Amino acid sequence: MRSPLVQPLRLERDGSARRANAVVRGPEPREFPIVCRPSSHLSSEFAADVLLCDVTAGPTRSWKDCAAPIAVEDAVRSGHRQVVVASSGNHGRAIAHACRARGLKAAVLVYERTPADVVASLLALDAEVYRAPDRAAVHAALAAFRADGWYAATLLDELRASTLMPGAVGYRRIARAIADAVADDPIVVVPTCYGDGATAIEQHLVQLGRQPTMCLVRAAAGDKAIAASIATDVVTAQVATLHATGAIDVGLKDEAFRAGVVTMNAAVGKRLDLAEGGTPGALAYLADIGLLRSGRSVVCVVTGALYPGLSG
């Protein structure tokens, strides 16, 4: 039984694609390229060795495309036909796309403030979308879906904070691209830090013999340019663990994201998610505290380009 606190949303359209009666036994999902290259634009502006690690060439143009197909394959192997995820956008789209490719049903839990175009993009991928008023409702709904036999692609709170979300091993590809591109222990800027992706990249870099300093960028308290993250207690604990390893937290106001995304669009050559606008603000902060003068490589992970139909 679903939690009474979540409201289903439906896409009104003429006709709808039929879902396969059996799991699609297609080929394993193909890996998309991850390009890690120097940025002359940002290197010149901040007088540092700045590289861009572009992870937006996947089917939903987000770094979540590294993890979602692996999670869905795990669901298939464990006999599940339905996958539920709590997401403010990119994770939900990646899971919905991977589920549709394999003939599975996807359900995505979003917060009330999630933009309408994000919800529409999820519905267009044949996902069931449920809007929840608050974090408690998200937790209750996740538990209800799991009790109904759904595979949870979002960690529930009783699981250990050291456990990464299903499919997170896919982020190893990002860590490998970074390690192949730089010879030192890099500073890694992650502009959409809600725990799991940054945690996985940090852990995989350590396994590859590097000691990165993670820079975590988020919206300042009270600002609303970036949609609220669906953060379970596990994700909150993961961020706290990153802080314990020396991670740097940067909170930026709305105007910093809006100005910064223009800079990043020019540097990357794509129309990026608004969240990517946090990267220049993070670099400015690192310069202010003197960390850019250390001579270490700075790798800025580009985690999301605009999905078709989303406004910029």
Image: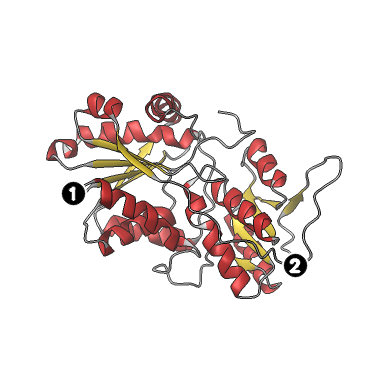
Tag count:
2
Q: What element carries label 1?
A: loop
Q: Nearer the viewer, residue 84 or 174?
A: 174
- Relative vertical location of residue 280 with respect to residue 7 in this rendering, above or below: above
Q: Which of 219 and 57 is in front in this view?
A: 57
Q: Looking at this rendering, what residue extends furthest in the right direction? A: 14
Q: Which residue, given by chain and number where applicable, does mark 2 sit on? A: 22
Residue 78 in sight from this viewpoint: yes
Q: Looking at this rendering, what residue extends furthest in the left direction? A: 294
Residue 59 point in image, percent of width and height: 56, 45
From the image, which quarter does the C terminus lie in? top right
Q: Which of the marked residues, 2 or 1, is nearer the chain's N terminus? A: 2
Residue 185 point in image, percent of width and height: 19, 51
Q: Which residue, given by chain and number where applicable, does mark 1 sit on? A: 183
Q: Is 309 placed left or right of 299 in the picture? A: right
Report the residue at 68% width, 55% height from top: 100
Disc 1 crowd rating (10 Å Cα; few below 14, some 14-19, many 20+) is few
- Which quadrant of the structure image shows residue 1? bottom right
Report the residue at 65% width, 75% height from top: 79
Report the residue at 60% width, 62% height from top: 139
- Relative vertical location of residue 244 with respect to residue 222 in this rendering, above or below: below
Report the residue at 29% width, 46% height from top: 188
- Inspect the image, locate mark 2, and give the three-letter code of the amino acid beneath it: Ala
Residue 195 in sight from this viewpoint: no
Give the alpha-carbon distance from disc 2 to disc 1, as whole Å. 47 Å
Q: Is 286 placed left or right of 63 in the picture? A: left
- Relative vertical location of residue 149 with respect to residue 136 in this rendering, above or below: below
